[in-house]
Image (cartoon, helix red, strand yellow):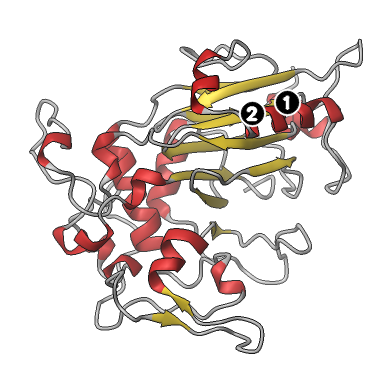
Amino acid sequence: MATAASAASSCRPDNGHAAPPAQLKEVYKRYQSATSGMLEDDEQMVDWASNECPRGLRIYPALIPPRSQLRLLSCLLHRDLSNGAHQTNVHLHHHLSPPQGYAPPPTTTTGGELLKPSSPVASNSFFRYDPASTVTFAARDPQRHAALPIARCLRQRLRWITLGGQYDWTTKRYPVDRSPPRFPADVGRLVQGLFPHTTAEAAIVNLYSPGDTLRLHRDVSEQSAKDLVSLSLGCDAVFVIGDGDGGQDVDGDVQVEVVRLHSGDVVVMSGPARYGWHGVPKIVPDTCPAWMADWPASPRSGARLTPTEGEEEEEEGGLDEFEGWRGWMAGKRVNLNVRQMFDGS
């Protein structure tokens, strides 16, 4: 019996620079210009209540509990962002240096849980800089780029972080001539604990604000056809995907799914959907959960999560020292996209 990975491998596109079908581009453009009110009344877009999706696309609504979402957010943006081995779009033109005088945070935990926000995960976080300060990051080429203030860097310019295998956006390949930095072990355990058939070797963390988009594309650079796993944090997003087998049915019409994703939802692209054309034409403003909106500052009392049975009350989401950044997540969507680079890992 053919596995989902073998089925996906058999339809792997050879051309990573191909253009998406015209009909799919029209759907994408329609949602790109849609207002929040239009989205509420849209009949094509689905708010999935189950993971019963066609052709290898699986949606798991609210799979990641709120506390785990906050812990994951802190691991990614406090700890992993401050690790210079994990490159960002800002590194392309500027020298980034985390605050000095703090011990680097541990890269993993001793147990199976993600680090808590109150642990050393935030020790040398970029969010320790005061957003009102004069801290700037020097340009690699001062003749072409100005120094970048910390507030503008974190609020506007930071768009992606690469974890583990460092994807080369110019060649659209993973470098094979050098060893990649270690993938964050606790994040890998979280993903592989839920989806054990995919080994977490590389990830792209995309950061969006309302008005930002992700163009239609296919993920074809990996040498493995194992499932792609995508976790959503923060504001809602409109996700558009077309069939992976060329994107058309027998009548020549593109088969399209339009899904509204919420914080905590997980998308898995397997089988024919593994190489489907997909993109994010819309980030829906004012939709970040109240208990996450104040991150990296501590949530206000009315927005704190209620402890579940056997769980001590704690101020999830941040520490008071991040007060200057209060509300940073209110206008953000953070998307963790995990993939396996090579078979036999």
**Residue at image coords 25%, 47%:** 294
| Residue at disc 2, secondary structure | helix
Residue extending farthest bottom = 143
Q: Residue at x 69, y 45 (%)?
A: 343
Q: Position of residue 51 (x, y in %)?
A: 52, 16
Q: CA distance from mark 1 to mark 2?
A: 7 Å
Residue in the picture at 43% in, 56% down: 184
Q: Are circles 1 and 2 on residues that touch, CB within 8 Å?
A: yes
Looking at the image, can residue 304 be seen? yes
Which image quarter holds the N terminus? top right
Location of residue 253 with respect to 307 vertically, above or below:
above
- The residue closer to the viewer here, 298 or 66, is 298
Disc 2 marks a residue whose amino acid type is Tyr
Across and down, in percent, residue 345 comes to 62, 48
Dividing the picture into quadrants, the one containing residue 34 is top right
Q: Classify 44 as above or below 306.
A: above
**Residue count near mark 2 (Cα–Cα under 10 Å), binned few <14, some 14–19, many ≥20:** many
Which residue does the numbered mark 1 point to in the structure image?
Answer: 27
Q: Which residue is mark 2?
A: 31
Question: In the image, is residue 286 above or below residue 131?
Answer: above
User: Label 1: how many residues lie within 10 Å, few (<14), some (14-19) or many (20+)?
Assistant: some
Q: What's the residue at 76%, 30% (across, down)?
A: 8
In the image, farthest residue toward the right = 251
Which residue is at the front of the view, 4 or 174? 174
State whether residue 112 appears in this view. Answer: no
Q: Amino acid at mark 1?
A: Val
The image quadrant of residue 124 is bottom left
**Residue 53 x/y as whole percent:** 61, 14
Q: Secondary structure at mark 1?
A: helix
